[in-house]
Amino acid sequence: MIALHSSKPPVTLKRFWKAVAAGVITSIAAAAIMAIGMKTGLSPLPKPLGLAFAEWVLGRALPLPIGMLFHLAYVTGWSVLFIMLAPARWLRFWPILSFGLALWLLAIFVITPLVGWGIAATAVAGPKGIVATLVAHLLFVFFLWLSCRWLFRSEASGKGKAPSA
């Protein structure tokens, strides 16, 4: 009988908690940069999308910390889902970029219309909404990739080596 080798790493509690850590790091780092964009007026969006989504889900106005918790939860959730289901070779830049762009498409065609901002937030920000939502997702990609390079370095490319791009 021939044994087939799978490149998918086993699901372990250690891998799960590393995935959670990668998601939390990604969420906090991306949120910090986006908060600077909001505070400086660089972002054309009227409020953080996490807050707008939380208000849509709960059906009422909410304080910013609730939106931040929603952001932390869904960024961590998507990160954990990707990392737990991905073969080790996917914890590299190009697969993470592909995943981030898929999430961007979900955000611009589903989430921003749900919260009343139109496709890609163009109803509230014009064409700048496309750029703003894309930049947010590219930040997600960058920080998730860095987190995976750090947390999964031995898994993705052999013992003791960081995953390559």
Image: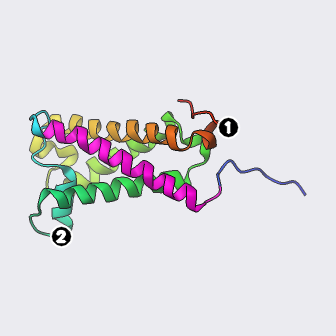
Residue type at mark 2? Answer: Leu
Kindly identify the residue that appears in the image at 18 percent across and 42 percent down.
35
Q: Position of residue 153 (x, y in %)?
A: 57, 39
Indicate yes or no whether the magenta region holds residue 12: yes
Q: Main secondary structure of the magenta part?
A: helix
Is residue 141 among the parts visible in the rendering? yes
Q: Quadrant of residue 62?
A: bottom left
Q: So how many labels did they put on this image? A: 2
- In terms of depth relative to the viewer, which is nearer, 27 or 98? 27
Q: Is residue 79 left or right of residue 92?
A: left
- Which residue in the structure is indicated by mark 2? 58
Whether residue 115 appears in this view of the structure is no
**Which amino acid type is marked by label 1?**
Gly
Nearest the eye: 106 or 155: 155
Residue 155 x %, y %: 62, 43
- Name the residue located 27 percent from the left edge and 35 percent from the top edge: 135
Whether residue 101 sits left or right of residue 158 in the image: it is left
Start-end of magenta stretch: 10-38
Q: Which residue is mark 1?
A: 158
Q: What residue occupies the far right of the structure in this picture?
A: 1
